[in-house]
Amino acid sequence: MNKPNKTILVPTDFTEVADFALQHAVRVSSVVREEITLIHIVDNPDKLAEAKEKMAKLAQDTYSKYNVLPSTIVRQGNIFVDIAKAAEELNSSMVIMGSHRIKSESTLNDSIALKVIASSKVPFITIQEPPINRRYDEIVFPVDYTAENIEKHSWISYFCDYYVSRFHLIKPNVTDPKLLAKVDMNMASARRYLDEKGARYYVYTVDGKKTFAEEVLEIAANIRADLIVIMTTKVDDKSAFIVEPHEQYIISNASYIPVMSINPL
């Protein structure tokens, strides 16, 4: 049976950071052999004609630069709803979106990327800088005690199928026996996936002198990670998700390291 066609969805507002996201998508596409779809949402029908002209030019420029001709979507709507909706409609494997660095906690609530992530059933990769490496060779997997954490382990198979990745499993420094047991259970699950794929991996336990998010970012920077994979948190409504403060910190401070955010099923 043939696999259904997938696409990599790239929201764009025609800014520099959106172009960085497109550059990342081109590199991912060259490895996984999936098409790219650009999407732009306008809030007023009067803006549609101009946006379509800009999108057509962007698609042609992309073809000229990278020999990749993306599909394009321009529609009126709400970016916090319609990007996620389009990702599902298009059977997207992931969304790659530019995200500005959040300078202070007071601006977290204004982050467009965080709000869009929380509405999506499709994994989001947020980026702030142009790509450094072509491949996801060094992948950081924080492993905590949450029930949701275990769901991202299925993505180990995805990365092993397309990349020769090395995985860095990072454990928090916890002393509570119940929480430690949950961390160990999640770690055992991750190792099981990795062992089945014959993947190389390393396990770190942070010393707890800083927040877990800060320690994850320090390790990621030291090993020159190509990707950090995190889970968001499900709220009581099964269709709703929130990006917890430590997850927000990683997304907003990862700088040159892309962050994949996965919402639990």
Image (cartoon, helix red, strand yellow):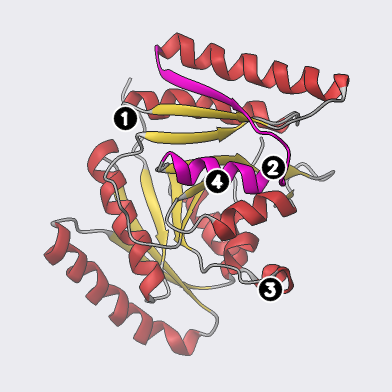
Give the x, y percent position of residue 215.
62, 43
Residue 27 in sight in this render: yes
Q: CA distance from mark 3 to mark 1?
A: 36 Å
Start-end of magenta stretch: 198-223
Q: Name the N-terminal-most of marks 3 and 2.
A: 3
Give the x, y percent position of residue 46.
46, 90
What residue did someone put label 4 on? Answer: 218
Which residue is at a point 23% across and 43% down the rendered structure image?
30
Q: Is residue 213 magenta?
A: yes
Please, is residue 252 above or below residue 225 in the view? below
Q: CA distance from mark 2 to mark 1?
A: 27 Å
Q: Are marks 2 and 4 in contact (CB under 8 Å)?
A: no
Q: Nearer the viewer, residue 14 or 180?
A: 180
Q: Dividing the picture into quarters, in which one does residue 12 lie?
A: bottom left
Name which residue type carries label 1.
Tyr
What residue did someone put label 2 on? Answer: 212
Name which residue type carries label 2.
Phe
Which residue is at a point 57% across and 63% down the rendered structure image?
113
What residue did someone put label 3 on? Answer: 107
Q: Nearer the viewer, mark 3 or mark 2?
A: 2
Please, is residue 188 above or below residue 59 in the view? above
